[in-house]
Image (cartoon, rainbow, N blue to C red):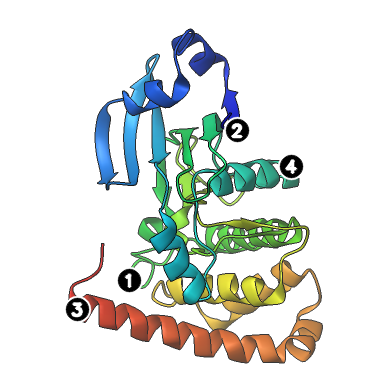
Amino acid sequence: MSRTTLFLDPTFAREWAGQDPFVAVEALEGEVFRALERRRTLRSEVAGRGYFVKIHRGVGWLEIAKNLLALRWPVLGAQDEWRAIRRLDEAGVDSLRAAAFGRRGGNPARQRSFIVTEELAPTISLEDYCGAWPTRPPAVRLKRALIVRVAEMVRRMHAAGVNHRDLYLCHFLLHLAPPPSAERIRLSLIDLHRAQVRAATPQRWRDKDLAALYFSALDIGLRQRDLLRFLSVYFARPLRLVLRDEAALLARLEREARRLQARFVRKVAAGTMT
């Protein structure tokens, strides 16, 4: 008998009553963002509300072997995102709300899974929101409040044993209702399908997340004092102690950001950006 894990919130329990959820989720229709043989991502509406749906149909042994040979842990299905969402919720980090999740099968290469999350709207990614800052700087208090909020979220995420693996500004959504202000900011962390969940976050993966975030913020007009403010909040220590104790990390962030930037340039030149 195949092993099955299933969660349905009241809306999906009602809408899919008497159906096989693994068949019902495949029947959902809407705007498709990714359609591959083994993975499908779309936006759909159920009971008048918007949802994002990710369907995994097994990665195959070849894909698993390729990842392991490259010293990467393969993404086997929706369970990584499901676990990360639950852990972040426990840690008080705003992220996605899962409305449905299912996993079926014990064979990791053929395992089928899906996750359905509520649409977060109206929102804008921090990448888009901050994109005009170099020419149209924001109010100082608002900028500082955003830096503090991002630093607090990342600190709590890592303290909870979660590393994101794609921690870029585009994966922080800023809620627009009510309009954000220095006193009222709500951010949600998204795109957790590659996230890893452990009892504690290894330093190597913590540093990779921080480097990715630093890289994504290079072109939004931040000054050195803004970066120092982030570090002070993230480490929850006086800045002089951070600069003394984390000198190796700061040097690595610079090196890793340059590496990511070079890789980005190569991808653009090769036309492989998606």
Q: Which mark is residue 90?
A: 4
Tag 2 residue: 3
Q: Are marks 3 and 1 in contact (CB under 8 Å)?
A: no
- Label 4 or label 3, whichever comes before in sequence order: 4
The answer to whether one can see residue 186 in this image is no
Kind of element beneath mark 3: helix
- Above-or-below relation of 162 to 91: below
Pointer 2 with pointer 1, Cβ within 8 A? no
Measure the C-alpha gap from mark 3 to mark 1: 29 Å
Q: Of callouts 3 and 1, which one flags the residue occurring earlier in the amino acid sequence?
A: 1
Q: Looking at the picture, how far across and down is residue 7, in whole percent? A: 59, 26
Label 3 to label 2, Cα distance in Å? 43 Å
Image coords of residue 11 (percent x, y): 51, 15
The relative height of residue 168 versus residue 11 in the rendered view (above or below) is: below
Which label was assigned to residue 270? 3
The Cα–Cα distance between marks 4 and 2, rounded to whole angstroms, is 26 Å
Residue located at (22% from left, 70% from top): 272
The residue under label 1 is: 135
Q: In front of the other: label 2 or label 1?
A: 2
